[in-house]
Image (cartoon, grey):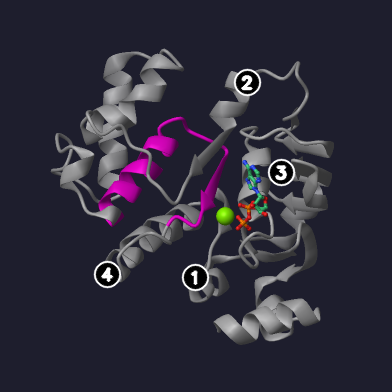
Amino acid sequence: MNPSAATRRPPLIRCREVRKSFNGVEVLRGVCLDVARGEVVCIIGPSGSGKSTLLRCINGLARIDGGSIHVDGLDVHDPATDRLALRRKVGMVFQQYNLFPHKTVLKNIMMAPLHVLREPRAEVEARARALIAKVRLQGKEDAYPGELSGGQQQRVAIARSLAMRPEVMLFDEVTAALDPETVSEVLVTIRELAAEGMTCVLVTHEMGFAREVADHVYFTDAGLIVEHAPAADFFNRPHDPRTQAFLAKVL
Ligand code: ADP
Ligand code: MG
């Protein structure tokens, strides 16, 4: 992206000194992270370092104990913030697809716009069909999740999130549970979204993919951001010894 764009406009996501504890154990210990509009940010780090918790705090699924998170100017953890407005802005896709098993692909994608946003059915259906085409699942409109491969189900999950027309998509290890042969079809979908300018935050262990699509990489360890840098710098010249050790293991 144009580097000056990031400095001209406030970040779409701004996390400041975010703290979060579970049962007295602090798992986010003052996390600061900015995501500019149109940017792709990858969050990388060892298991248990707080990556999923951070994403869940960004979309308001988990409460924070300190600091602040703003998404497109909305204070995510201010009780006065309109939850629906937040839900519209932030889409999230998980490792488990969480599709409704008794609903068809089309119905899964239509549900939130119909019942949460209460948009007109014809419009919702037209958009859902377009999204099915976008994630390359034409012909699967009437299939049930159980009839699809993992990669196909994950693409339905992505389409379902996109049906809310979010400003940003959060992806939490969305390929981690997939058979190797279906990983690439999901990565293709994410790559296309990123190329269209969708703001994306990806927690991923796919280092090759991170290197290719990310504008910025954040490295987490034990609840802290220990390093963040433009992707090329991050992978070519990691500074922190913890980043170096991690990359030495996974690359
Ligand atoms: P990551 O996604 O980087 O693997 P997580 O954010 O899932 O890390 O977890 C960070 C830490 O918080 C881990 O020690 C994990 O056990 C703990 N944790 C996460 N969610 C909960 C929860 N709901 N209750 C208690 N502990 C949790
Ligand atoms: Mg996780």
Task: Say which amino acid is labelled 2.
Answer: Arg
- Whichever of callouts 4 and 1 sits on the residue coming sooner in the sequence is 4
Q: Is residue 141 left or right of residue 95?
A: left
Q: Nearer the viewer, mark 3 or mark 1?
A: 1
Q: Which residue carries the number 2 mark? A: 83
Say if residue 198 shows up in the picture: no
Task: Say which amino acid is labelled 4.
Answer: Glu
Tell me how far mark 4 sits from mark 3, CA to CA.
Answer: 33 Å
Classify mark 3 as within 8 Å of ligand 1 or not, answering yes or no.
Answer: no
- Whichever of callouts 4 and 2 sits on the residue coming sooner in the sequence is 2
Tell me how far mark 2 sits from mark 3, CA to CA.
Answer: 16 Å
- Whichever of callouts 3 and 1 sits on the residue coming sooner in the sequence is 3
Q: Nearer the viewer, residue 235 or 197?
A: 235
Residue sitting at 26 percent across and 27 percent down?
Answer: 107
Q: Which residue carries the number 1 mark? A: 206
Q: Is residue 22 left or right of residue 147?
A: right
- Whichever of callouts 4 and 3 sits on the residue coming sooner in the sequence is 3
Q: Which residue carries the number 4 mark? A: 181
Task: Say which amino acid is labelled 3.
Answer: Ile
Rendering coords of residue 66 (x, y %): 85, 38
Q: Is residue 38 above or below residue 78?
A: below
Q: Are marks 3 and 1 in contact (CB under 8 Å)?
A: no
Tell me how far mark 4 sits from mark 2, CA to CA.
Answer: 38 Å
Q: Quadrant of the N terminus?
A: bottom right
Tell me how far mark 4 sits from mark 1, CA to CA.
Answer: 14 Å
Instruction: Identify the element where label 3 is drawn.
Output: strand
Stretch of the chain drawn in magenta: 151-174
- Whichever of callouts 2 and 1 sits on the residue coming sooner in the sequence is 2
Residue 13 is marked as 3
